[in-house]
């Protein structure tokens, strides 16, 4: 039987996964040689993620970390996805084994981060791109790359349109700000959310933070900021699913997490530019104009070379264990 100590270590690595607004929308349930990952809808994002696709992608990221960590602790895994009506959860059965093929991606679970600063314009070598993306694709998942100056320029209006829709939407901004952690004191208490330092911003406290958001951040200022960031990216990757359901969102999360870990291993930084996927009219336009056909784009990721920022926080393990 696998000890509780080992199961807790594995969960700790799983919870290092990325999640939309760093909500950490998961609960982990420990059983006999089994861990289940359950969605925590109290941490959903009803405005920006009304169908919960980002929530299930985040669970997929945690699943990928969990499998890699379990292997490192000499456990083979068998994953089963259970769906009951509106809710899906992931069950991982663990088997002790001496003959596991371990991956060095384990070493990058704690080093990975979403890096939101400006990147250098240095391009990524072709063989690195192949290594980054070849491994993660299958028939139900696809990634479309935007690498040349023209491709990136043509992508820009979709990003700006998505950003404009979001920053002109009061409910979006209210939800976003509710997950901002404007000081280290705040993030230490909450253990979640978007800490200003990990977004490349100074610690300013909630009062000043709210004032800045109200008076200095607008659709116009965001569009200006994005144009600069976009032109400084080595490339963009659009992650897409063929079937737009919970199971495939989880699979996409696994693929995205592998990408994040591989990129970290190669010293390549990445960050989200998801607005054109999140705003449905813009998503529809992309599907039409890029002839994505049966594929639904869910994540748009920029990548390139940059310097790391302070790491985001995670909640204490006791807060993410399920008592159900
Ligand atoms: C499904 C998903 C959606 C995300 N969407 C965004 C986004 O729209 N903008 C953004 O800046 N970061 C986005 N992120 C990144 C998270 O904010 C980030 O993972 C979280 O703050 C934790 O930070 P870390 O990944 O550096 O540990 C997303 C992450 C996931 C998994």
Image (tube, grey):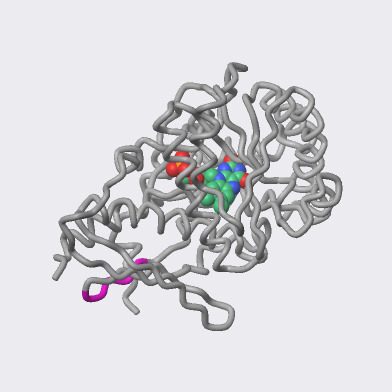
Number of numbered discs overlaid on the protein picture:
0
**Which residue is rendered at x = 41% and y = 37% of the image?**
112
Q: Quadrant of residue 64?
A: bottom left
Residue 96 percent coordinates (x, y): 18, 64
**Which residue is rendered at x = 56% and y = 49% of the image?**
137
Is 173 situated above or below 140? above
Is 31 situated above or below 161? below
**Which residue is rendered at x = 35% and y = 38% of the image?**
108
Is 27 situated above or below 264? below
Magenta segment's dominant SS is strand
Q: Quadrant of residue 62?
A: bottom left
State which quarter of the image contains the N terminus: bottom left
Task: Say if the magenta span includes residue 188.
Answer: no
The residue nearer to you, when weighing 52 against 108, is 108
- Quarter holding ligand 1: top right
The residue nearer to you, when weighing 153 against 19, is 153
What span is colored magenta in the figure?
28-32
Residue 255 percent coordinates (x, y): 50, 50
Residue 249 percent coordinates (x, y): 57, 61
* Residue 219 left/right relative to 178: right
Task: Say if the magenta span includes residue 31.
Answer: yes
* Residue 112 left/right relative to 9: right
* Residue 37 left/right relative to 233: left
């Amino acid at each position: 039987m696998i000890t509780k100590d080992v199961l807790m270590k594995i969960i700790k690595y799983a919870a290092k996964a990325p999640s939309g607004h760093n909500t950490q929308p998961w609960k982990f349930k420990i059983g006999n040689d089994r861990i289940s990952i359950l969605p925590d809808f109290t941490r959903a994002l009803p405005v920006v993620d009304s169908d919960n696709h980002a929530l299930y992608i985040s669970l997929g990221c945690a699943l990928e970390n969990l499998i890699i960590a379990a292997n490192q602790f000499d456990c083979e895994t068998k994953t089963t996805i259970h769906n009951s009506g509106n809710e899906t959860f992931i069950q991982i059965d663990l088997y002790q084994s001496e003959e596991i093929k371990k991956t060095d991606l384990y070493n990058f679970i704690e080093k990975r981060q979403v890096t939101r600063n400006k990147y250098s314009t240095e391009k990524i070598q072709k063989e690195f791109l192949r290594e980054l993306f070849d491994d993660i694709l299958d028939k139900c998942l696809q990634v479309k790359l935007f690498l040349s100056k023209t491709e990136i320029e043509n992508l820009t209006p979709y990003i700006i349109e998505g950003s404009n829709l979001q920053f002109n939407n009061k409910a979006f901004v209210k939800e976003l700000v509710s997950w901002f952690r404007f000081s280290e004191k705040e993030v230490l208490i909450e253990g979640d959310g978007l800490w200003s330092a990990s977004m490349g911003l100074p610690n300013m406290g909630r009062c000043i933070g709210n004032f800045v958001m109200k008076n200095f951040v607008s659709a116009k200022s965001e569009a200006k900021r994005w144009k600069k960031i976009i032109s400084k990216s080595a490339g963009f990757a659009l992650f897409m699913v063929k079937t737009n359901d919970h199971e495939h969102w989880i699979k996409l999360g696994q693929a995205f997490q592998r990408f994040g870990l591989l990129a970290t291993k190669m010293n390549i930084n990445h960050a989200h530019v998801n607005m054109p996927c999140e705003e449905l009219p813009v998503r529809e336009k992309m599907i039409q104009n890029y002839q994505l056909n049966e594929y639904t784009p869910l994540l748009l990721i920029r990548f390139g070379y940059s310097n790391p920022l302070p790491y985001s926080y995670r909640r204490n393990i006791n807060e993410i264990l399920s008592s159900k």
